[in-house]
Image (cartoon, rainbow, N blue to C red):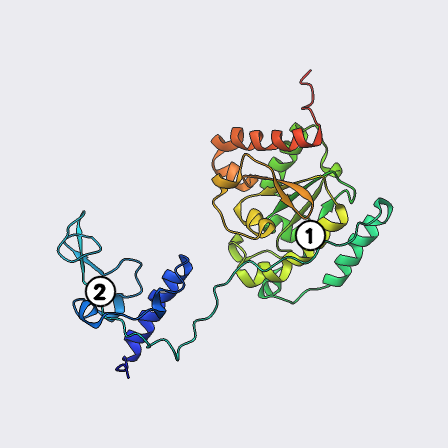
Amino acid sequence: MAPSLDPATRAALLTRVRFYRDLGLTEFYRRPVDPELAAQWTVEPENLGAPAVGVAVPGSTSGFSGERVGEHELQPAPALQPHFLEDQPIPPRKLIPAPPQVAAATPPADRAAALELIREEIGECTRCPLHAGRQKLVFGDGSPTARLMFVGEGPGADEDAQGLPFVGKAGQLLNNMIAAMGLKREEVYIANVVKCRPPGNRVPEQEEGATCSPFLFRQIDVVRPEVLVALGATAATWLLGRRQPLAGLRGRVHSVRGTKLIVTYHPAYLLRDPRQKKEAWADLQIAMRELGLKPPSKE
């Protein structure tokens, strides 16, 4: 029987296991550990949660004792007992939940009414903590038969006050982007991943996105746009069901619920870094190509 570990060491080792599990290494902790090799390593328990192999102390850094890289040094890591985790179930990693199945197509004449039914079902929503700080729920805006749909992250202060998506400074920029594509705002449909404003405009948390995104998918199924544009990494994450850097998603056409998806920067980001507007325009041109649109004449 393996000797028991003190609570601090056990908790720290569990933290380490979760770290490696999130990297995709899910079986290493179940394999037997050579006691002779393991006994060669020691480390303070409170430092086991760090992603490095040992403990960083002033002097050098490396995965092995005695090696030096930069300004820090790592002490050897601790022994792992082969069976210490058997009575400590590890909670599953939080993943983006699977979206609902694609609904049957709604006739164009019935789409406005179908969207209104979704809005009525949401009601004065209290399903997640975001409702506590909202002024108005922000459902969506635009044409129920739009060929192009934009999806953002969540409402900001102006949107929370008016109950409409993208009506603040970022919304004004989005309007300009839509106009540059040769369209009017009332010709597209705009929605967000979450319908209530996150405090301080922070990124929606897992529970919040998982609670609200099914309503977004139902909106997409009703509108049936030919092209979706995800505005920012959060929208792209929930639409695609996976986390990936924005740079790896831009510049190509994805598929979501039978609809073509283009990923670009959020207008709020473009306000902070106008240098990226050229890159965003390149993304929108991909959407225009898929829709058969040409930019309006400047004359």
Front residue of 281/66: it is 66
Task: Give neighbour class at mark 1: few <14, some 14-19, many 20+ (Cα, 10 Å).
Answer: many
- Residue name at image x 39 percent, y 60 percent: 25
Decide: is 185 above or below 71. Answer: above
Mark 1: secondary structure? loop
- The image quarter containing residue 228 is top right
Residue highlighted by disc 1: 163
Residue 205 coordinates in the image, percent (x, y) = 53, 59
- The image quarter containing residue 8 is bottom left
The disc at residue 37 is none
Total tally of numbered discs in the picture: 2
- Residue name at image x 55 percent, y 33 percent: 280
Instruction: Tell me if 245 is positioned left or right of 107 in this view.
Output: left
Task: Give neighbour class at mark 2: few <14, some 14-19, many 20+ (Cα, 10 Å).
Answer: many
Residue 211 coordinates in the image, percent (x, y) = 62, 62
Residue highlighted by disc 2: 77
Q: Amino acid at mark 1?
A: Gly
Q: Label 1 vs label 2: CA separation? A: 54 Å
Please tell me which of labels 1 and 2 falls first in the chain: 2
